[in-house]
Amino acid sequence: MTAKTSTFSVCGMCTVRCPIQVETENGIIRFIQGNPHMGGIKGALCARGAAGKALVNDSERIQRPMIRVGERGQGHWKAISWDEALDYAARQLDTIIKTYGGQSILFSDRGGPFRDLHQAFVRGLGSPNWSNHDASCARNVHHAALSLFGFGRKELSYDFKNSRHVVLQTRNIFEAINVKEVNDLMTGLEKGCKLTVIDTRANVTATKANRFMMIRPGSDYALNLAVIHTLLNNKLYNEAFANQWIKGLDALEQFVKPYTPEWAETETGIKADEIVNLVRDLTMAAPAVVWHPGWMNARYNDSFYMSRTIYIINALLGTIGAKGGMALANKPGDVGRKGLKKLVDRVPKPEGKRADGVGWRHPYFDAGPGLINLAYDAIETEDPYPVKAYIAYRHDPLMALPDPERIKQKWSKLDFLMSVSFSWSDTAWHSDLVLPLSPYLERESILASKNGLNPYFFVRHRAVEPRYDTRSDWEIICGLSKRLGIDALAFNSIEEIWDYQLNGTGVSMADFDAKGFVQLGDGPLYRSELSFKTPSGKIEIVNDKWDSQGVLSLKPYERTSPPEGRFRLTFGRCGVHTQGHTVNNSLLFEQVSENTLWINSKAGSQLGVSDGDMVEVSGNGKSGRLRAKLTELIHPEAVFMLHGFGHRLPVETRAFGKGVADHELMCGGLDKWDRAGGGIALQEHFVSVSRV
């Protein structure tokens, strides 16, 4: 008899976590689509999400717990049982806690909606050192928002489908895909919304734009200062909004006086009249304007200021809180509902200070996920205390962060390094113990909520049973908690966790059956009453907390250029892969199997390089070989490659040896980070190119 089932779940191929519906037959996945009941999703799914089936069927993923039997990184493993693995991990952690204290344990993950369980576990260990990947992603954006509004970047939502003009600067929305955002933007474009793209190369998103501005790498901050100058000098800003909600407008006006469009033309390569025309177009569309503050904005030494000036531009246009603009994101309480009960509230918050210095050595930074690169410094220096254990939970720093050999040196002082991962990674390969996480289609997760114009709760159900000896998040965390005496997290089933989370919300698990999510409001809610969590209750151009630490709220622009004969190394995403962890996926590998080096046609010809030639790219004592892609669609000062290639693990036979790993060319990169925003400056590295 044929048994067909339909399961509502959540994609796990990237950090967006789109709602999905999975069709199975006799326990075999037949079809995956976006949740058809979710507005903005419309049943759609990106290529990565559609390739989830290949992840489940991949015989090269981690199939059972593995313990290291040789030196770290040699790849000598012994398969063990789950009881052996959890007992071993618990013994290691318990010994370290008793010797050094709970704060000696560091934990990092990929962030996302299910982090509550991880944060609770780290608290249960007695450690303040929960962290995630955000230092290499959006910390600059978050802190830029915090410095102006008193709240972080996720308190605002992008109302693309009602916008009249969208500006994307360091946001490649049609390749680094959030399905709902893509569909909402396409809806807006169909209704006449204009799209402006500002980038160092013409990416896929630029091909959809009404206006593409190719900017000189590293000069985004200069452009934004000129936009602010034009708004203020020509009285094109929303004076009523500014007078009511912006504090420090006079200081801003004085600061931007030198930064004229004519000056910006010499810095950015974008003509002065193009800058003025952009501003005039924006003022005509305002307040239904979204100038996106950036997604992965761990780029330049001044990327915090780039994001900060974007938020200021939005404020000057009156888009904050506006329909079609940067609308306020609603939490359950904003629509008269109670939020999910938090697992972190079941365990006391540790009183100790963070190893990375966030919140005390750097008091202007939001503790949150901290800065993982600075936590690695603490491993090496034991300042402010020894860090002896590290749990990398679905996080691959050796692929995601610069200078992996330097990271390994820092990790050499760890007594215990454990990875939890559904696939092999450079970090898992270098660990002492690897616990195999079931892929997202084979696991259920804790409930989560999504804030926005109409907030909702959602659930990830298991679509199929695990093919190999792998386990879900909650099984791993609760199994360790039982062994470590963290009774508050010693749950016996996911249903127990769900019941706890839903207690007092007025929602039951049966309410998820129809659609896989529970909408909490009656429809999009645009709150007209603004509220900023600053001392003045307004948007503060000058932030005393930053300035008191010697970090200027209004920082003069400083030009950086490549050394003679070199190019700025830039990297990014394509619509097929999510960084490094999808490159070995059999379906996605067929689409894009290796990266190429984009180089400006004129710059390439001057080097004697033709399109398709094999070239060597060298930087900071490291080098790699890949094919050149000559094109007019990239700035002459930059080269570009897709991130996530250059795999060297023998267990990844498809990805092995394909392309070049950009982060390996970034020696010393851990020390290049934005002191104002916390993000690592991943695109402050310069390389040379030569024909092989």
Image: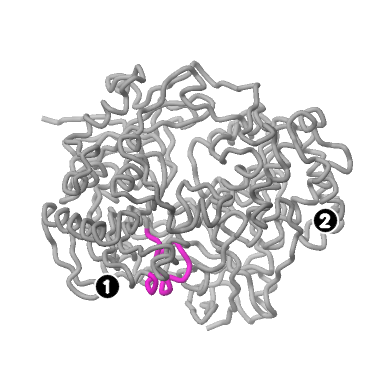
Dominant secondary structure of the residues highlighted in magenta in the image? helix
Q: Amino acid at mark 2?
A: Lys
Q: Quadrant of residue 598?
A: bottom right
- Residue 72's disc is 1
Image marks 2 and 1: residues in contact by CB distance under 8 Å: no
Q: Amino acid at mark 1?
A: Arg
Q: Which numbered disc flags the more N-terminal residue, 2 or 1?
A: 1
- Residue 664 in the image: state x and y as whole percent: 46, 72
Query: In the image, 334: left or right of 318?
Result: left
Residue with the mark numbered 2: 271
In the structure shown, which secondary structural element does the residue marked by tag 1 occupy? loop
Span colored in magenta: 396-410
Q: How is the image coloured?
A: one colour
Residue drawn 53% across the image and 65% down it? 641
496 or 639: which is nearer to us?
Answer: 496
Is 87 magenta? The answer is no
- Residue 544 in the image: state x and y as whole percent: 68, 46
| Residue 658 showing in the rendered view | no
